[in-house]
Image (cartoon, rainbow, N blue to C red):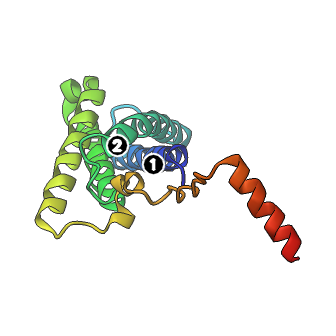
Amino acid sequence: MTRSKVVALVGGLSALGGAIAGAVAATIAAIVFTPNAEYPVSAPLIALIVAENALFAGVAGSVLGTVVAFGALRRVPLGKLLLCTNTGLAAGFTASWLGGSWAYHNFTLLGFIGFSAGAVLARVLSRGSPSAPASVTIASESQGLNQLAAAPVDLSTPRERAADRVRRNASE
């Protein structure tokens, strides 16, 4: 797999995970707020809130997840990194919904704090375990998995190569 395909794969998985985290946070908020809301909340409004959160978190996850995966956390297994950062993102978004007016107005900040806490957790969890196999980490791509063997170099002179061709043709 080429580096661009790996980046696209990590970005896509991060976007999907971020979208799921945003949708989960909005769904939790809608479940909690619906019975207690001062204003009636309809099903289409809940669906719109979930879709907006999923879109916002998907874009944020695509950008942040790719940067983190290829940045400081290159040695963390990709599955563990995505799971921890998206769980932290969902927790941060849920806290922003449930934390009152200050938290609601700092939705992005709490989401970023949750994402960062998840990244730190992924690093701590992978530091205590034996080093991950090269095939599951982002850094494995730079260890030569996709490199082709070097072509043999012919250091003979053109005259010697011509003589070899004549001998091969004569023997056939």
**Res. 40 in view:** no
**Which quadrant would residue 29 be assigned to in this image?**
top left
Up/down of 147 relative to 51, above or below: below
Neighbours of disc 2 within 10 Å: few (<14), some (14-19), many (20+)? some
Q: Which residue lies furthest to the bottom in this view?
A: 172
Of labels 1 and 2, earlier in sequence is: 1
Q: Which amino acid does label 1 sit on?
A: Val
Position of residue 61 measured from the top left corner of the image (x, y, whole percent):
40, 40
Return the residue at label 1.
Answer: 10
Return the residue at label 2.
Answer: 70
Q: What residue type is labelled 2?
A: Phe
**Mark 1 residue element:** helix
User: Could you tell me if the residues under marks 1 and 2 are in contact, i.e. CB atoms within 8 Å?
Assistant: yes
CA gap, disc 1 and disc 2: 9 Å
Up/down of 165 relative to 108, above or below: below
Up/down of 52 relative to 47, above or below: above
Foreground disc of the pair 1, 2: 2
Q: How many marks?
A: 2
Say left or right for 44 vs 54.
right
**Res. 71 in view:** yes
Give the quarter of the figure containing the N terminus.
bottom right
Position of residue 154 measured from the top left corner of the image (x, y, whole percent):
60, 54
**Mark 2 residue element:** helix
Position of residue 161 measured from the top left corner of the image (x, y, whole percent):
72, 55
**113, 152: nearer the viewer:** 152
Q: Give the residue at x 88% y 76%.
A: 172
